[in-house]
Amino acid sequence: MPTVYQGLFALVWIAWAIYWLASARNTKVTVRREALGSRLLHIAPLLLAAALLCMPEGMAPPLDRRFLRPSLWTFWTGLSLTVAGLLFCVWARRHIGANWSGTVTLKQDHELVRSGPYALVRHPIYTGLLLGFIGSALACGQLRGVLAVALVAWALWRKLRNEERWMLEQFGAAYAQYCRQVRALVPFVL
């Protein structure tokens, strides 16, 4: 993929990261937080997945093998999916407001948000991130992209399961009903 195209992906992800870091300050006080070891089990795979997609060809030759030929179609489709996924993350982040945390936590006066993107899926930030990585992997077209998506899916699913346990403890029957009504990651499917 020509450097100018790779630069577009970097620009999109960097813009998202800047927004994400800037908006992380406006949250409620945390009253319960998952243990550091548990946090690392979902943060480390996400960082490894990002590194896999960013690494130059030749650093891990077996992972450079292509599953898709490079084309303008795969590039633009991948970029569109990445942008759509990250915008979905931003919508969810803005909608959940001060209840948000980058790790599994309970906030003071934590609210169960079920509107906006949370009416479509219970974990729209994870849905958006996964879609962003899928788009980036599609444009990459190499096995390292497939591995990156698998790592992201595993890390987010693990984090989602922990978060669901905490939400059930906090909100009880209301959260159980929400789980019956709204899928976790993919509307109407998963």
Image (tube, rainbow, N blue to C red):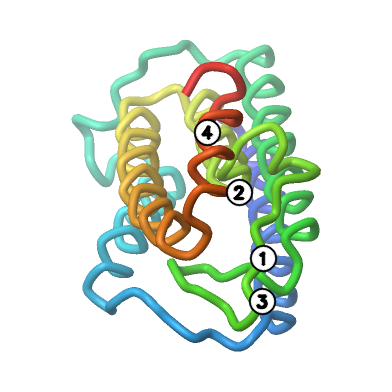
Q: Residue 23's spot in the image, x, y percent?
A: 74, 74
97 versus 156 height, above or below: below
- Of mark 4 and mark 3, the one earlier in the sequence is 3
Query: What's the CA distance linking mark 1 and mark 4?
Result: 20 Å
Q: Which residue lies under the disc numbered 1?
A: 111
Q: Few, some or many C-alpha atoms within 10 Å of disc 3 (few <14, some 14-19, many ≥20)? A: some
46 versus 141 height, above or below: below
Query: What's the CA distance linking mark 2 and mark 1?
Result: 17 Å
Q: Few, some or many C-alpha atoms within 10 Å of disc 1 (few <14, some 14-19, many ≥20)? A: some
Q: Nearer the viewer, mark 2 or mark 1?
A: 1
Q: Nearer the viewer, residue 170 or 29?
A: 170
Q: What residue appears at the point 62 percent right and 72 percent down from the top-left corner?
A: 110
**Badge 1 element:** loop
Query: What's the CA distance linking mark 2 and mark 4?
Result: 9 Å
Q: Nearer the viewer, residue 189 or 61?
A: 189
Q: Which residue lies under the disc numbered 3?
A: 24
Residue 125's label in the rendered image is 2
Q: Few, some or many C-alpha atoms within 10 Å of disc 2 (few <14, some 14-19, many ≥20)? A: many
Q: Is residue 62 left or right of residue 118?
A: left
**Badge 3 element:** loop
Residue 185's label in the rendered image is 4
Q: Few, some or many C-alpha atoms within 10 Å of disc 4 (few <14, some 14-19, many ≥20)? A: many
- Of mark 2 and mark 1, the one earlier in the sequence is 1
Residue 11's label in the rendered image is none
